Amino acid sequence: MNKNIIIAIDGFASTGKSTLAKCLANYLNYTYVDSGSMYRAITYYALVNNYLPFNNRNLKDFFKVLADVKLNFIFNENLGFSEIYLNNINIEKEIRSILVSNHVSSVATISFIRKHMVNLQKEMSLNKGVVMDGRDIGTVVFPNAELKLFLNASAEVRAERRHSEYVKQGVKVNYEEVLNNLRSRDLDDSSRTDSPLIVADDAIEIDNSFLSMEDQIFFVKKILKDKFNL
């Protein structure tokens, strides 16, 4: 078999889904879509426009404006991957804040928001040749994806990774706050009634608590070669 395929990468927060997805997309010359950044962008929009916290009235107002919120990815040649734009403005840096992180899981539980995001994500894969990561890619967005991966790692390891990222960015946040945020997001992601984070039956699970990114890339490349001749 030698054709373009869809690669769905799901998993808990800070398991390296985006890094692995970017590497695979570059290796295959595929389109990379970070579905999590789409939810972060919507959360950022809701924050800056004073919709959060949601209540019965402003949620109805948000439903009315959601269709007019434009999200798209533009490839950054200097970085080697696509960045997300909200209404034609690059917000890649803004969506990584701890404030957005503290709200994104609750925003992602809203059914009409998830439905809108899934429709957008499916449109991005019309020609296949896509690597997409998120929480429900292999179960909801692309249940027929040719290759499904599910990444996991201990909460403590993931918190260390995320805390290091914040430190490098000059963001002042303590480890315990990051750990508590991740545990809260894990619970929200796994327990929501609409598209909960679960392992697809045909997904290949990778616990990368003690695996380097190079180890993971080597492992997945072997699968691509053996199974798909890619």
Image (cartoon, rainbow, N blue to C red):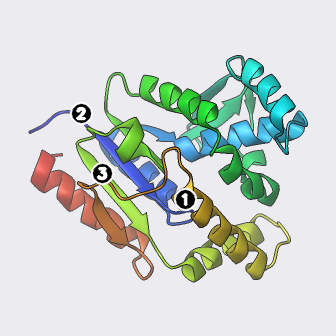
Amino acid, disc 2: Asn
Quote the CA–CA distance across marks 2 and 1: 34 Å
The relative height of residue 178 versus residue 225 in the rendered view (above or below) is below
Q: Which mark is residue 191?
A: 1
SS at badge 3: strand
Name the front one of labels 2 and 1: 1
Label located before the other in sequence (3 or 1): 3
Q: Which mark is residue 148?
A: 3
Q: Position of residue 200 (x, y in %)?
A: 32, 54
The answer to whether the residues at label 2 and label 1 have Cβ atoms under 8 Å apart is no
SS at badge 1: helix
Q: Position of residue 42 (x, y in %)?
A: 71, 36
Q: Badge 1: few (under 14), some or many (20 or more) residues near its Cα, within 10 Å?
A: some
Q: Residue at horizontal 12%, vertical 37%?
A: 2
Question: Which residue corresponds to mark 2?
Answer: 4
Quote the CA–CA distance across marks 3 and 2: 14 Å
The relative height of residue 23 versus residue 25 in the rendered view (above or below) is below
